[in-house]
Amino acid sequence: MKDFRNIIFVLIIATFILQMDVSKQDAKAEVKNEKPTVSLSTFALYDIAKNISQDTLNLVMILPFGVDAHSFEPTPKLMAKIMGSDLVVYSGAGLEPWTSSFEFKSKVIDMSKSVHLLKPKDGHEEHAHHDHGHEAVDPHYWLDIQNMISATKLMRVEFIKLSPKNTDLYNSNSEKYIQMLKSLDAKYKKFLANCKKKTIIVNHNAFSYLSNNYGFHIEALSGLSPDAQPSAKNMVRLIEHVREHDVKTVFFESFVSNKAMKSIAHEAKVSVDVLQPLGNITANEAEKNLSYEDIMLTNLQKISKALVCE
């Protein structure tokens, strides 16, 4: 009887050890199969990552949908999530002031260092003295499609390092995304090639990359800062320009007050519409699952109409 009890005891201990070993193997497998996490600071970068990774990575959009990129400050909770990421990709060029004091523990990419940046004077931007003053470049570089191609190629390389088993998928998806971008560039060139007017009116100049690449001009109520208070002198100047050049539409941007541009439109008796600079998208646009391509095509339609393009 005593021997039988000893056998039962040994079997119980053996079973327990076996279960512990299985649990450890399951835990190791779970860790091994866990998706790497990538945090991205702006919608354009997020759109690239989403299309390349195709659910093989955990993507964190740092900037909440519906929030202005220029004034955003991450919460401590979000900071912790960023800190725990395997890779952080932020826009740079002064767009995210919070990054200057943030100590990144993971690998970080300042995308502005891998793209072509315009200085305000290079972008055919008039009245550049209304800019931030300390900023030497225009941070809205994702509106240059060649910059988006450069960003796509860089992210493909970094994603392959994070998840080598998905190399073929990342290569294939990035090539598809680049082809989409090239098609988008061709459409802009085609639809803005022959226009009766040469200037669009906006409340702040987030569109120099588009105007520089596709041959039109910008008249802005303020410079690169969406928060700059418009002067009465500038408002009068734009009203006179609208009347003199028979402009039919003036534009404001998402996340920026439309009050000043509506006032100009009312005085000049023209329509007012919204252009999307794509630093972020609205909550409504996010619900509709709109992509970078979708919004760029909508912008093209509105710009070509304002410029009276054939």
Image (spheres, helix red, strand yellow):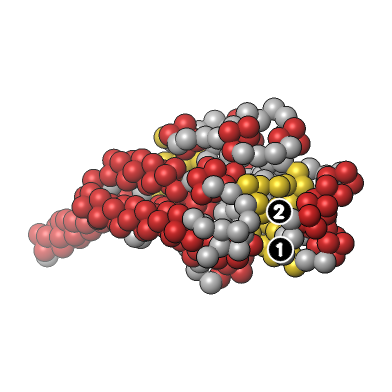
Q: Could you say where residue 225 lies in the image, as x and y percent from the top left?
A: 71, 42
Q: Amino acid at mark 1?
A: Thr
- Residue 300's tag is none
The residue drawn where x is 23% and y is 46% is 164
- Where does label 2 land, which residue? 201
SS assignment at label 2: strand
Label 1, residues with CA under 10 Å away: few <14, some 14-19, many ≥20: many
The residue drawn where x is 63% and y is 32% is 121
Whether residue 130 appears in this view of the structure is yes
In this rendering, would 76 be left or right of 190?
right
Instruction: Work out whether mark 2 precedes mark 1 in sequence or the reverse, and give the earlier one.
Output: 2
Label 2, residues with CA under 10 Å away: few <14, some 14-19, many ≥20: many
Q: Whole-Å distance between the Cαs marked 2 and 1?
A: 8 Å
In this rendering, would 244 be left or right of 232?
left
The residue drawn where x is 50% and y is 52% is 44
Hey, which residue is sitting farthest right in the picture? 232
Residue toward you, 60 or 140? 140
The residue drawn where x is 54% and y is 30% is 103
Q: Could you say where residue 143 lies in the image, as x and y percent from the top left?
A: 52, 49
Q: Could you say where residue 116 lies in the image, as x and y percent from the top left?
A: 47, 35
Whether residue 64 appears in this view of the structure is no
- Where does label 1 land, which residue? 249
Q: Could you say where residue 140 lies in the image, as x and y percent from the top left?
A: 57, 44
Q: Quadrant of the N terminus?
A: bottom left
